[in-house]
Image (tube, grey):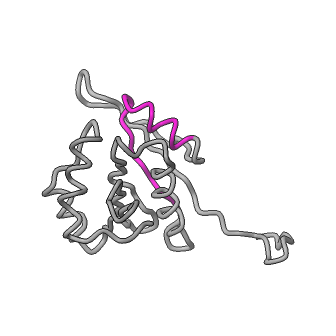
Amino acid sequence: MTRVMTLSDAMTCSLIEERSSPKPMTHDYLMKCISSGNSVGYVAELDNVIVGHVIVLFKEDSIEILSLTVDEAFRRLSIGTWLIKVVLDRLDDEYKKVVVRVPDSNLVAHIFLRDLGFMVNEIVKSKKRHGDDVYVFEQYYVKDSMDGNGNNNGG
């Protein structure tokens, strides 16, 4: 089950970040994100236990994923896919794409996003001598051009 993250979920989500993310979001930043008017977090629960979360920022015409983390004990159960689907389901005529920025070193995330249909749109070179380049993955909203009977309406 997924639901909107509440302030009372923040500590659990911060602990999952610390245990499971190579570059965890700080608790203060997580609180700032979910308290702002243009960001929202979603949590994934199994048996009423939070096992992962995604935090997104709504921009003018896009949704940017700021953090996607699944507790290591619950990986390989499609929870990350489930959370991405929640975000993709928000795409419409207003929010036309989902954007995810991934460091070069996070190959697992590159493969995960590619397998979900995301494409690299840009590579941002690091300004640090030994820093990671950042790959900007995007997936665009495609208006369904089929009617309820499976006929193409040409959209």
- Measured along the vertical axis of the image, is residue 72 above or below residue 9? above
Range of the magenta residues?
A: 97-114
Give the image location of residue 136, x and y in percent: 44, 43
- Residue 124: x and y in percent read 38, 37
Question: What residue is at 35 percent from the left and 54 percent from the top?
Answer: 51
Location of residue 49 by image quarter? bottom left
Please state if 90 lies on the left or on the right of 71 as rendered: right
Quick check: 151 left or right of 40? right
- Taking the magenta stretch, the answer to whether it contains residue 28 is no
Residue closest to the eye, 61 or 47: 47
Q: Percent x, y for residue 78?
A: 51, 49
Residue 66: x %, y % from top left: 33, 53
- Quarter of the image with the N terminus is bottom left
- The residue drawn where x is 49% and y is 47% is 77
Identify whether 86 is placed above or below 51: below
Q: Is residue 110 magenta?
A: yes
**In which quadrant is the C terminus drawn?**
bottom right
